[in-house]
Image: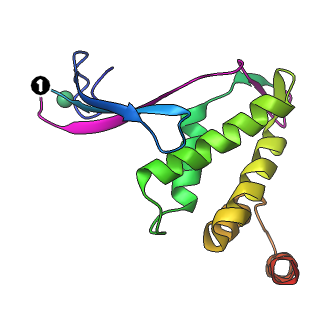
Amino acid sequence: MRCPFCGNEDTQVKDSRPAEDGASIRRRRSCPACGNRFTTFERVQLRELVVVKTDGRRVPFDRDKLARSVRVALRKRPFDEERIERIVNGIQRRLEVEADSEVTSRRIGEVVMDTLRDVDEVAYVRFASVYRNFREAKDFRAFLGQIDGS
Ligand SMILES: [Zn+2]
């Protein structure tokens, strides 16, 4: 595993244990080159997902990209790394289960919104406002009305 700080290829595993969800292994690693520490999660992949973008292009599903948008939505919210990882796993698992092998980027957005709505309303609104790319304030108000109503 390459060090995310300095790019060194040869990092060491300090500790491995099952993550809370039991579906992944959490490893603490350290880099002998720069001394930084980081955590990786190893998980079972059910199938290789292909994402169909809105312009019709097909690209391999990028879990890191999904994790980044979930992290952005949950920034400064009371969620630790492991819980975020569990949320991302849940989203990926749901996509893997319901998709044949292809999933639209739109569907991914919907599943993320669904999931965030259950775990944190602030994160949900953040993600949804970016995802739906509100151009008019009234759309956003209508949207907030939907949340209040649910
Ligand atoms: Zn390093």
Q: Main secondary structure of the magenta part?
A: loop
Of the four image quadrants, the one with ligand 1 is top left
Give the colouring mode of the picture: rainbow
Q: Residue at x 75, y 61 (%)?
A: 133
Q: Which residues are magenta?
A: 32-56
Asked if 49 appears above or below 105 in the picture, the reply is above
Q: Position of residue 67 (x, y in %)?
A: 55, 43
Residue 52 in sight:
no
Q: Position of residue 6 (x, y in %)?
A: 22, 29
Q: Position of residue 54 (x, y in %)?
A: 84, 37
**Mark 1 beta carbon near ligand 1 (under 8 Å):** yes
Identify residue for label 1: 32
128 with respect to 66 (left or right): right
Residue 108 in sight:
yes
Q: Residue at x 70, y 18 (%)?
A: 48
Depth check: 55 or 38 in front?
Answer: 38
142 with respect to 16 (left or right): right
Q: Residue at x 63, y 68 (%)?
A: 120
Three-letter residue code for mark 1: Pro
27 with respect to 57 (left or right): left
Asked if 135 appears above or below 41 in the picture, the reply is below
Q: Residue at x 72, y 51 (%)?
A: 112
Depth check: 69 or 137 in front?
Answer: 69
